[in-house]
Image (cartoon, helix red, strand yellow):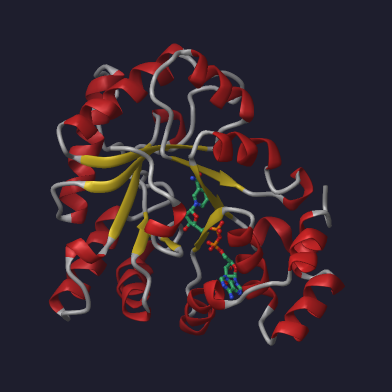
Amino acid sequence: MPNQPLSQLPNFLYGTAWKEDRTTALTELAVRMGFRGIDSANQRRHYSEAGVGEGLAAAYRAGLVTRNDLFLQTKFTYQRGQDHRLPYDPAASLSVQVAQSLASSLGHLATDHVDSYVLHGPSSNYDWTDADGEVWDAMHKEREAGRARLLGVGNVSLLHLQQLAATRVELPAFVQNRCYARLGWDRDVRQFCRKHDIVYQGFSLLTANQEVLQHPLIASVAASTNATPAQVMFSFARSIGILPLTGTTNAEHMKQDLASPNLTLPPNAIQAIESLAG
Ligand SMILES: NC(=O)c1ccc[n+]([C@@H]2O[C@H](COP(=O)([O-])OP(=O)(O)OC[C@H]3O[C@@H](n4cnc5c(N)ncnc54)[C@H](OP(=O)(O)O)[C@@H]3O)[C@@H](O)[C@H]2O)c1
């Protein structure tokens, strides 16, 4: 399936990391508040994917949405990113681990496919390795079997993407990265994504950029647009082509986050924010 333009995807992805026994209630609340994109991972260390599935089931039971209304994304995580609660046999080949992990995710989420399947992070912080090539190939097989619609990679550098491209395999539909203002909002990776029609998903937009969130420029843009600083950050992110994630646990913040795509920032404000930190 060809990569999709940002406009055909949900405005926001609701992130389900670090919620532990609140995962079910917060996932249902997020759907109730209007989120239609849900991000998870089969990585028990940071996510309770089974809890996400229970939250979705509650939302279906309450008649809030059906499966087809949702964009569900989950991830394959190498053993080095996991604790002892593995969703696969670590003695199996990486291809088998991918198949086992996705089968387990589909069980957690009570669905026959995910809309996006993401390699959580490459096996090396520096290079795209043969192991990554094997996993990427296995992820394509899952997609061909109909168990995933689109594929992505996370926590990648420009070098990872260039090396992946050099192997002449299909490029991802998504890149999901932590987006630091001080790195020009991940400018190099975003440029690569723009050139190759890859949707860039940005996380930690607020938490990794506290100095920007508290900057007088953001306060003045927020005051002049009658928005909150967080809404300005999310609106800015969208205007430079980032599909934002939020993992807020607060209903009022959910409402504000979902309203942020309606906020249009003046071009000079976008430029000023973009050049604020790198
Ligand atoms: N691929 C990866 O390796 C990776 C890594 C990290 C995260 N992620 C994904 O990204 C998701 C989001 O994570 P994140 O790092 O961006 O941080 P986050 O978990 O969304 O944390 C956001 C923080 O900002 C606060 N906040 C204050 N005002 C807010 C507002 N108006 N809207 C939203 N938050 C507000 C939140 O507090 P309140 O709860 O009080 O609102 C919370 O403490 C995760 O759940 C996960 O799905 C992926």
* Residue drawn 30% across the image and 68% down it: 24
| Above or below 167: residue 262 | below
In this view, the residue in front, 209 or 2, is 2
Q: Quadrant of residue 116?
A: top left
139 relative position to 63: left or right: right
Q: Is residue 252 above or below residue 80?
A: below
The quadrant the N terminus occupies is top left
For residue 169, which quarter of the picture? top left
Q: Is residue 94 left or right of residue 108?
A: right
Q: Is residue 49 left or right of residue 17?
A: left
Residue 135 at least partly seen: yes
Measuring 86% from the left and 73% from the top, which residue is drawn there? Answer: 216
Does 178 appear above or below 69?
above
Given residues 153 and 44, the one toward you in this image is 153
- From the top left corner, tell me how far across and down residue 232 is, in percent: 67, 72
Please provide percent x and percent y for residue 195.
57, 35
Q: Position of residue 126 (x, y in %)?
A: 61, 21
Q: Residue at x 16, y 72 (%)?
A: 60
Q: How many marks?
A: 0
**Ligand 1 positioned in quadrant:** bottom right
For the question of whether residue 85 can be seen, the reply is: no
Left or right relative to 192: residue 154: left
Question: Where is residue 209 drawn, in percent x and y?
Answer: 72, 58
Vertical placement of 108 versus 228: above or below? above
Task: Identify the image quadrant of residue 105.
Answer: top left
